[in-house]
Image (cartoon, helix red, strand yellow):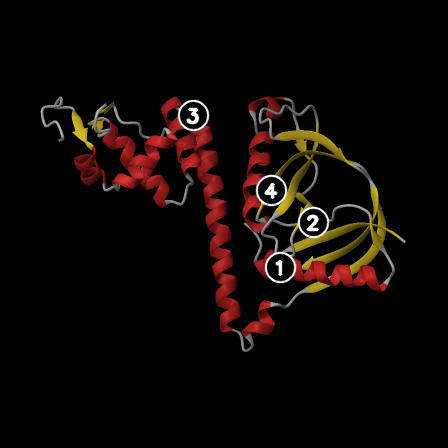
Amino acid sequence: MIDHTMPIDQIPIGKFSHLTRLSKKALHCYDQKGLLVPVAKDLCSGYRYYAIAQIDRAVRIRALAGLGFSLDEVGAVLDALDQGDTRVVAGLMQMRRRAVRQEIDRLHGVERVLSSADPLKELFKMSLTEWTIKEVAPLRVVSTREKGAYAEVTGPMIEKLCREVALPENRNAMVKVTGTVISICHAGDENGSDCDVEVALPVAGAVTVRDPAIEVRVLPGCRVLSTLYQGPHENLPLAHRQVREYLAAHSLHQTGPEREIYLNDPAETAAADLMTEIQYPVRE
């Protein structure tokens, strides 16, 4: 039985759910994440009680989630607000805006394909040019590595590296980004759903790394087959198929994990105009 004699400033979860328009399931989730922890819990029933002052925080969580922030990002925004760190808040908002811009561009691309005379032909259209074999010099980078679906892990990994490079100590040390984002597929299945992916960002200067999942290292130099792909990132698997066919046709043997170098920003470039250099370390 719920105790209706609790202090006046304590609101039972059912009433709090109604006041904040957050489901009980969501409130349980926010409790587990440490985003919105009840001020009291009934030891016998486990029933949760919230304070009146927590309504504001609940409303902020709901609003931020509505903007598409993940729960971890919501927590980062709230922490920054609590600390009065407007710079961090602005950075997180800008990061979310870029993600929204990418999704808008993706949907525009979907609309363009569906509106074309031959949607399937338009969908798989691509351009591979500037085939060459060249020597690639060693490259100093900050990098991070994860396993998972290629399309799902690369974006968050890029954001993680950008945040690390933007740390105050790195800005003070005049750390510079000297190139564009690189991804390296160390292992993976054909459909990209189970990959071992490294994302790297070329840098110069005395880099400070706080995140243990990030390291400063040198990508080894090597001889590569290089080609320039133009088109949406979703069609990169088709480009890799053509590269592998080229390897076989020219008796070239792959000697290391392939690399993708993203030459322009999806947040600022239409999907059809994205340029990616594909590199395969090779020997004849």
Query: Is the Cβ of the residue at disc 3 closer than 8 Å to that at disc 1?
Result: no
- Tell me: residue 160, above or below residue 107: above
Query: Which of the two marks, 3 or 4, is nearer to us in this view?
Result: 4
Q: Residue at x 76, y 59 (%)?
A: 244
- Residue 182 placement (x, y as % from top left): 68, 44
Residue receiving disc 2 = 260
- The answer to which of marks 1 and 4 sits earlier in the sequence is 4
At mark 3, the secondary structure is: loop
Quote the CA–CA distance across marks 3 and 4: 33 Å
User: What residue appears at the point 64 percent right and 43 percent down from the top-left corner?
Assistant: 197
Earlier residue among tags 2 and 1: 2
**Real-space CA distance between mark 1 and mark 4, rounded to the nearest whole angstrom:** 28 Å
Kindly identify which residue carries mark 4.
147
In the picture, the disc for residue 85 is: 3
Please tell me how crowded label 3 is: few (under 14), some (14-19), or many (20+) other residues with Cα within 10 Å. few
SS class of the residue under badge 4? strand
